[in-house]
Image (spheres, helix red, strand yellow):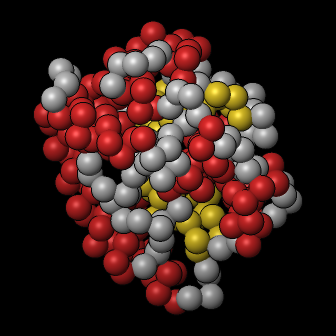
Amino acid sequence: MARIFCIANQKGGVGKTTTCVNLAAGLASAGQRVLLVDLDPQGNATMGCGIDKRSLSKSVYHLLVGLCTVAEARVRSESGGFDVIPANRDLAGAEVELVGLDRRENRLRDALALHQSEYDFVLIDCPPSLSLLTLNGLCVAHGVVIPMQCEYYALEGLSDLVNSIKKVHANLNRDLSIIGLLRVMFDPRVTLQQQVSAQLESHFGDKVFKAIVPRNVRLAEAPSHGIPGVVFDRSAKGAQAYLAFAREMIERVKTL
């Protein structure tokens, strides 16, 4: 059965989508069968995988409101080597529609149930808020991967996110846990970032992934080409960091 992970952080602009797309491509390059679910109405993960969100006939919106199946919604990312359930602006309206539906927080869980044996990993790119969409991701996931910058505001947001995860664990999904924290956009020249990184390691221990993703121009350029960064320039420092993270993920899953 697939291991299902949310890439989540209530703070925006912390590299959730970059992490999700590059982890998916990194796992795929290591021979894993991967499905990426884009739960963000902005559809950035969809575009980053080389899929045109404007020309979709079916998307995760149709999946959540029961208008199609996973098999009908998924698209192949040829550049990344994995499957994607894409998203576009239609998804913004799903929040309102989901409120009136049965099992509204379990719509994604129900949809994925029949397809878990087809994948080794299912990665869910969540929007930067604890919305009904994020809740659908958290209710189906076995764990949460939290990408975060080593800055003061990021620490503030982290405590809110941890509390939200605890509430979902207590009330909706007993399988949910924090798999680990990934330090992204890291600049070792900044003393504050080194201090925050050390704080994370002392407080969360081995929940902090050893891989550290540096600030990297090539990673930032990749989405405009519709190619994951680890494929766009495999030799770049950022790509190497995400490939190391993918290998670490595979090893960590063995111990869960």
Q: Position of residue 252 (x, y in %)?
A: 54, 38
Q: Is residue 35 above or below residue 234?
A: above
Q: Residue at x 31, y 64 (%)?
A: 158
Q: Is residue 45 above or below residue 251?
A: below
Q: Residue at x 71, y 71 (%)?
A: 216
Q: Quadrant of residue 68?
A: top left
Question: In front: 240, or 15?
Answer: 15
Q: Position of residue 198 (x, y in %)?
A: 45, 74
Relative to 146, is 52 on the left or the right? right
Relative to 38, is 119 on the left or the right? right
Q: Position of residue 251 (x, y in %)?
A: 60, 36
Question: In front: 39, or 213?
Answer: 39
Q: Is residue 94 visible?
A: yes
Q: Is residue 48 above or below residue 104?
A: below
Question: In front: 160, or 204?
Answer: 160
Question: In front: 88, or 39?
Answer: 88
Q: Quadrant of the C terminus?
A: top left
Q: Position of residue 222 (x, y in %)?
A: 74, 59
Relative to 104, is 23 on the left or the right? right
Q: Is residue 6 visible?
A: no
